[in-house]
């Protein structure tokens, strides 16, 4: 079976990967956590629709590709919860006046527009863009990490939480593949954490970016794997390995 990135690679690219020894199987760890990166309304829109329609309201939306990925994410999250594995979400946080948006404003002409239209969005009853999509909303025992930069590790407690839980590995899904997913994967790798990126659970605005970044992560930083492979591995793990937060029912 061909890989999603095959159409984007030249024959020279494939030879370089093979000759350099890239893409070896890293393998799963023994104590994994499931990281769900930024699957919020801002990146998904409120429903499945073509991306060029969705970004009229949500400039960061990935359109229909987000809604293809969400059922896969839900399936893995359910399997993790059934075994008592940690499920950890990241999402953004920003002041209402957008002062702390910082470098996000350097390369996107619609950042100031977002601030100007915030009250208009509220009037039409759109949800908070940083809220996790309700189809995969966190449950009481899950952990939510708030961040302001691409990596889930930068300026957050994520690494400390993984250490507290005794995790040696992570499964990663979410968006965008080329941005916040990749940044989080590289930081996990840099902290000697084994990483598996679940292909069907990741999405991006640009198809070439999605495919090429999966290829590059698989070559150097992570195993890019199918959902069914992860589910089969989770099924082999003993239940109750982790001391998770007790949470509080809504």
Image (cartoon, rainbow, N blue to C red):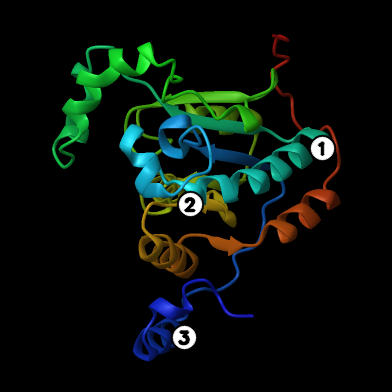
- From the viewer's perspective, is 222 left or right of 1? left
Residue 60 is at least partly visible in this image: no
**Residue at image point 73% right, 10% down:** 249
- Using the image as rendered, state which of residue 45 and residue 197 is in the foreground: 45
User: Do the CB atoms of the residues marked 3 and 2 lie less than 8 Å apart?
Assistant: no
Kind of element beneath mark 2 = strand
Q: Residue 130: x percent and y percent?
A: 43, 25
Which circle, 2 or 1, is nearer the viewer?
2
For label 1, the residue is: 83
In three-dimensional space, the C-alpha distance between marks 1 and 3, rounded to whole angstroms, equals 37 Å
Q: Callout 3: 10 Å neighbours few (<14), some, many (20+)?
A: few
Quadrant that contains the C terminus: top right
In three-dimensional space, the C-alpha distance between marks 2 and 1, rounded to whole angstroms, equals 26 Å
Q: Residue 123: x percent and y percent?
A: 36, 11
**Residue at image point 76% right, 53% down:** 231
For label 3, the residue is: 18
Which label's residue is closer to the chain start, 2 or 1? 1
Kind of element beneath mark 1 = helix
- From the viewer's perspective, is 173 left or right of 140? left
**Residue at image point 40% right, 40% down:** 54
For label 2, the residue is: 203
Which circle, 3 or 2, is nearer the viewer?
2
Quadrant that contains the N terminus: bottom right
Which label's residue is closer to the chain start, 1 or 3? 3
Q: Image height check: is 245 above or below 183?
A: above
**Residue at image point 22% right, 34% down:** 104
């Amino acid at each position: 079976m061909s890989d999603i990135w095959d159409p984007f690679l030249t024959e020279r690219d494939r030879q370089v990967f093979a000759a350099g020894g890239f893409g070896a199987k890293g393998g799963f760890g023994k104590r994994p956590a499931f990281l769900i990166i930024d699957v919020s309304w801002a990146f998904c829109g409120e429903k499945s629709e073509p991306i060029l329609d969705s970004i009229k309201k949500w400039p960061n939306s990935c359109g229909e590709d987000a809604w293809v990925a969400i059922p896969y994410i839900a399936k893995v999250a359910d399997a993790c919860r059934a075994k008592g594995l940690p499920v950890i979400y990241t999402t953004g946080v920003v002041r209402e006046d957008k002062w702390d948006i910082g470098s996000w404003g350097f390369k996107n002409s619609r950042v100031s527009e977002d601030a100007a239209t915030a009250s208009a969005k509220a009037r039409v009853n759109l949800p908070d863009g940083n809220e996790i999509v309700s189809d995969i909303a966190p449950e009481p025992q899950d952990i939510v990490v708030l961040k302001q930069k691409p990596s889930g590790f930068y300026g957050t407690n994520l690494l400390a939480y993984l250490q507290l839980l005794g995790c040696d590995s992570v499964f990663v899904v979410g968006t965008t593949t080329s941005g916040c997913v990749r940044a989080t994967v590289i930081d996990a790798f840099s902290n000697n954490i084994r990483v598996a990126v679940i292909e069907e659970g990741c999405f991006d605005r640009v198809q070439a970016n999605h495919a090429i970044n999966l290829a590059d992560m698989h070559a150097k930083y992570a195993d890019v794997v199918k959902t069914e492979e992860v589910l089969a591995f989770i099924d082999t793990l003993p239940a109750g390995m982790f001391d998770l937060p007790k949470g509080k029912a809504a």
